[in-house]
Amino acid sequence: MNPGELLEISGYFWKTCALHAAVKLDVFTVIGDAQFTGKEISEQLNGSQKGVERLLNVLIAMDLLEKTGGKYANTPAGKTFLAKDSAKYLGHIMMHHHHLMESWSQLDQAVLSGRPVRTRSSFSNDEWRQSFLMGMFNLAMGLAPKLVPLIDLSSHRHLLDLGGGPGTYAIQFCLNNPQLKATVYDLPTTRPFAEKTIKRFNLADRIQFTDGNYLKDPIKGRYDVIWLSHILHGEGPDDCRMIIQKAAGALEPGGIIIIHDFILNNSMDGPLFPALFSLNMLLGTDSGQSYSEDQIFDMLTAAGVKDIRRIAVESPNDSGIVIGSV
Ligand SMILES: C[S@@+](CC[C@H](N)C(=O)[O-])C[C@H]1O[C@@H](n2cnc3c(N)ncnc32)[C@H](O)[C@@H]1O
């Protein structure tokens, strides 16, 4: 690595902050399909013309806005991914990232103490919960259409999406498998987000939401497939074993359990994103972490799961899938 690359990594947060500020101020929605002067945009944002124009000019340099004859307009990327009225809006996950920044700036303290520094959780208030849960929707909508066809559920009837959040994967599995119905199991505070999302896809007759806390409550009902996406990394190894045991116990004989998460290699030192994600869990939880393939295989084996295998997946954040049956 050369000094230029190192300095780019060191200063990258400037670009991050410019993007977050623009999303937080909703610049791209305000501009929409129109063209405005800096003065007009600053008036709509109720902000200083000096500050707003400085940000707008950076957004031009980042190819998110363009300027003709002194007027600012969205580029296709700005309009498609950052304007709130777009179906491909990614602002929720960006606001979730923004909420994590304070804790990431104290990483040195968490590293030394081995303890979380985050004072607020993603569930603390409505705004944080919305950006977390709908941020999960943003991420899963990018990946689920690619992952779901890799898993043959054509002979399955009832999927449990454990910790399913807004239900994105349950939705995509049902869209891909017309015979399938699904239950999304999550905390009661998630219900409105899941029900709204399920309704948006016209699947309310096939996907139901059930309130539950997988650390404390039983899993009611029997399923022939259980999908656990991005929930193990939130818990320590003992709780993960307990959750997997509970899930395996809710499967009909021959049913399958599928784990989707950021999976580390067995020496725990890569790929980069799962390794970074493990730091993110150190910052925010007592015992959450990324797990290696060996660790996940061991947890499944301890729960009596058989025929455990990894499915090859190409995903931007190096998430992986492990599947087994009871
Ligand atoms: C990282 S999100 C993953 C959401 C979804 N599975 C996905 O992959 O897009 C973790 C989910 O687990 C839920 N969750 C966290 N702790 C839980 C608990 N103790 N019981 C039930 N759900 C929980 C959260 O509400 C959230 O929806």
Image (spheres, rainbow, N blue to C red):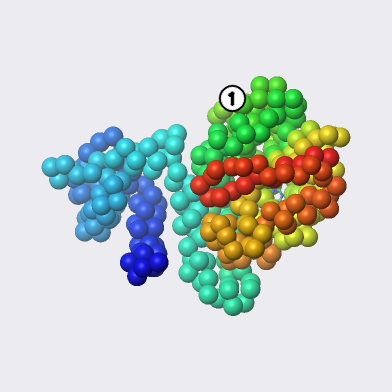
The residue that appears at 34% across and 70% down in the rendered structure is: 3
| Location of residue 5 by image quarter | bottom left
Q: Which residue is mark 1?
A: 202
Disc 1 under 8 Å from ligand 1? The reply is no
Image quadrant in which the C terminus is located: top right
Q: At which x and y percent is residue 88?
A: 44, 37
On screen, residue 235 above or below 89: below
Q: At which x and y percent is residue 255?
A: 80, 35
Q: At which x and y percent is residue 26?
A: 36, 47
Asked if residue 127 shows in the view, the reply is no
The residue that appears at 48% across and 55% down in the rendered structure is: 97
| Viewer-proximal residue among 314 and 93 | 314
| Viewer-proximal residue among 211 and 17 | 17
Q: Which residue sits furthest top?
A: 178
Asked if residue 292 shows in the view, the reply is yes
| Viewer-proximal residue among 282 and 38 | 282
